[in-house]
């Protein structure tokens, strides 16, 4: 049987993006990857797994008074749709982020990715509804929007991380076109892909603008822990006293991507409902998407939180030093290889995983393939983070999952690619 006429999102190159980048990486396993936004594996320890689960079991029996049967049921049975570790997550948010949240306003999700999908599904009531996102942005958000037929209008990032003038202009224009802007997706800390963070005045002004425009801010914060040389800044959610922000967290970078646990704090009240939060509506959708987040995964996260006094930030102090060192090595390495006048420039993020490099030639998927094959170095074309045109002569470098030797080799190879593109002489990199 041949299938035709499938959902039109499936013909959108955006949905191929992650697979394409993975596929290139798999085809050239000896290439140094300056592409992958993966956490470092140096601190992954399989022995910790049992320890975390044991710690969670102890919590269930000693703190919650469950007998053996109750513990088994909690870990092995279908569970509460919004999750079973909401109280512990609320404590973690208080400790690490200064966010006070009613545990009932939390939904534990299968990664941040599911949280985005749930929010977009809920907000998309009809063909007039649109989302806005600071552009360039994480393709997971734009991709999830495609799946629910929600157009995403770009808002310029600018040097501050969000151009508030442009935000207002986009909202105004959308309304004039008969559209209904529902939310703004933003990554205020060490954004993917730009590495930019919003300063505190910008965060406050963003909140103000969102309030005035009646726009829900969807704040996604997977990288905020990795402060590099910067001081930690308050999340937009922690500055918000009017439930203007739905806050998405993820343990993919701060614990284990494989655990697939994220969450959303959604304490907005929903019009027409007697009681309850936006989170309850998201829970209804979740019950038809993933039913519940696997309790074993939630147990690992909970055990980690209990073991580390609820501070993911403190538990990550060693790996944060590693990321800071890598970022410094990449920045210094770029400086040495691309002097002023070379036509190559880059930004200097204060932390996180990513740096954006601008080059005097087109850096597209074709060049990435060539780079992987001939120079054995991978990077991410910035065009993948634009919904439409943009980023054609830029590439994203990631410094998270590399040794100092990889960084040197990777940058040498990248310099080889740049020299070749500028002079036209193809010389395979060492
Ligand atoms: C900005 C951003 N949000 C969310 C995610 C995905 O999070 P999760 O693995 O929890 O779905 C990523 C992963 O790369 C990301 O960069």
Image (cartoon, rainbow, N blue to C red):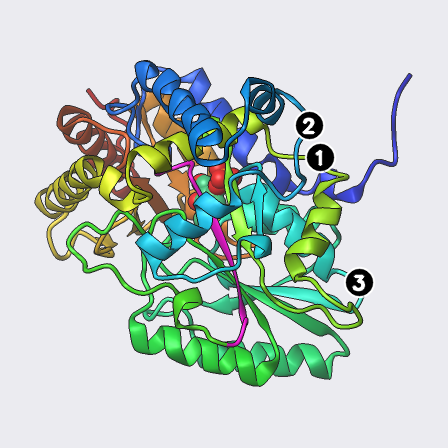
- List the residue tagged with mark 3: 125
Element type at marker 1?
A: loop
Q: Look at the image and tell me whether residue 312 can be seen.
A: yes
The residues tagged by marks 2 and 1 sit, at their Cα atoms, a distance apart of: 8 Å
Q: Is residue 273 above or below residue 120?
A: below
| Quadrant of the rendering where the N terminus is positioned | top right
User: Residue 200, percent across and down?
Assistant: 30, 73
Mark 1, mark 3: which one is toward the viewer? Answer: 1
x 68%, y 43%: residue? 12
Asked if disc 2 and disc 1 are in contact, CB closer than 8 Å, the reply is yes
Which residue is at the front of the view, 385 or 93? 93
Element type at marker 3?
A: loop
x 66%, y 38%: residue? 80
Left or right of residue 134, residue 180 in this image: right
Left or right of residue 70, residue 202 in this image: left
Q: Tell me, for residue 291, which label it has, or none.
A: 1
Q: Give, as a single range, the part of the protein colored magenta.
A: 242-254
User: Residue 262, percent across and down?
Assistant: 50, 42
Neighbor class of circle 1 (other Cα within 10 Å; few <14, some 14-19, many 20+) is some
The residues tagged by marks 1 and 3 sit, at their Cα atoms, a distance apart of: 22 Å
User: Residue 416, percent across and down?
Assistant: 22, 32
Corner quadrant of residue 424: top left
Corner quadrant of residue 350: bottom left
- List the residue tagged with mark 2: 78
Element type at marker 2?
A: loop
Q: Is residue 244 magenta?
A: yes
Which residue is at the front of the view, 160 or 110? 110
Going from N to C along the chain, the mark reached first, 2 or 3, is 2
Going from N to C along the chain, the mark reached first, 1 or 3, is 3
Q: Is residue 331 magenta?
A: no
Going from N to C along the chain, the mark reached first, 2 or 1, is 2
């Amino acid at each position: 049987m041949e299938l035709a006429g499938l959902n039109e999102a499936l013909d959108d190159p955006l949905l191929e993006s992650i697979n394409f980048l993975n596929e290139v990486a798999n085809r050239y396993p000896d290439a140094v990857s300056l592409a992958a936004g993966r956490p470092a594996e140096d601190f992954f320890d399989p022995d910790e797994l049992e320890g975390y689960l044991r710690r969670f079991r102890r919590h269930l029996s000693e703190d919650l008074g469950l007998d053996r049967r109750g513990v088994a049921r909690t870990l092995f049975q279908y569970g509460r749709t919004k999750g079973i570790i909401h109280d512990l997550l609320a404590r973690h948010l208080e400790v690490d982020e200064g966010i006070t949240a009613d545990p009932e306003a939390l939904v534990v999700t299968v990664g941040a990715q599911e949280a985005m999908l749930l929010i977009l599904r809920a907000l998309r009531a009809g063909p007039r509804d649109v989302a806005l996102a600071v552009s360039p942005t994480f393709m997971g958000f734009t991709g999830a929007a495609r799946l629910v037929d929600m157009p995403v209008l770009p808002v310029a990032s600018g040097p501050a991380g969000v151009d508030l003038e442009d935000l207002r202009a986009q909202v105004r224009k959308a309304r004039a076109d008969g559209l209904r802007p529902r939310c703004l997706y933003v990554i205020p800390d060490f954004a993917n892909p730009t590495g930019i963070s919003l300063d505190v005045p910008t965060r406050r002004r963003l909140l103000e603008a969102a309030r005035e425009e009646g726009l829900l801010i969807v704040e996604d914060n997977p990288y905020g822990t990795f402060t590099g040389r910067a001081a930690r800044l308050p999340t937009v959610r922690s500055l918000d006293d009017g439930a203007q922000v739905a806050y998405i967290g993820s343990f993919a970078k701060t614990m284990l991507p494989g655990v697939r646990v994220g969450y959303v704090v959604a304490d907005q009240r929903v019009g027409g409902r007697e009681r309850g939060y936006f989170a309850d509506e998201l829970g209804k959708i979740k019950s038809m998407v993933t039913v519940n987040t696997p309790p074993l995964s939630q147990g690992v996260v909970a055990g980690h939180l209990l073991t580390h006094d609820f501070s993911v930030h403190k538990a990550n102090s060693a790996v944060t030093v590693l990321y800071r060192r890598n970022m410094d090595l990449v920045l210094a390495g770029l400086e040495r290889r691309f002097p002023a006048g070379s036509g190559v420039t880059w930004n200097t993020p204060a932390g996180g995983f990513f740096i954006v490099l601008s080059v005097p030639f087109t850096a597209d998927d074709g060049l990435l393939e060539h780079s992987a094959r001939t120079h054995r170095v991978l990077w991410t074309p910035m065009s993948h983070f634009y919904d439409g045109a943009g980023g054609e002569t830029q590439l994203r470098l990631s410094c998270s999952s590399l040794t100092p030797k990889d960084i040197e080799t990777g940058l040498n190879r990248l310099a080889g690619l740049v020299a070749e593109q500028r002079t036209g002489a193809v010389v395979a990199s060492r």
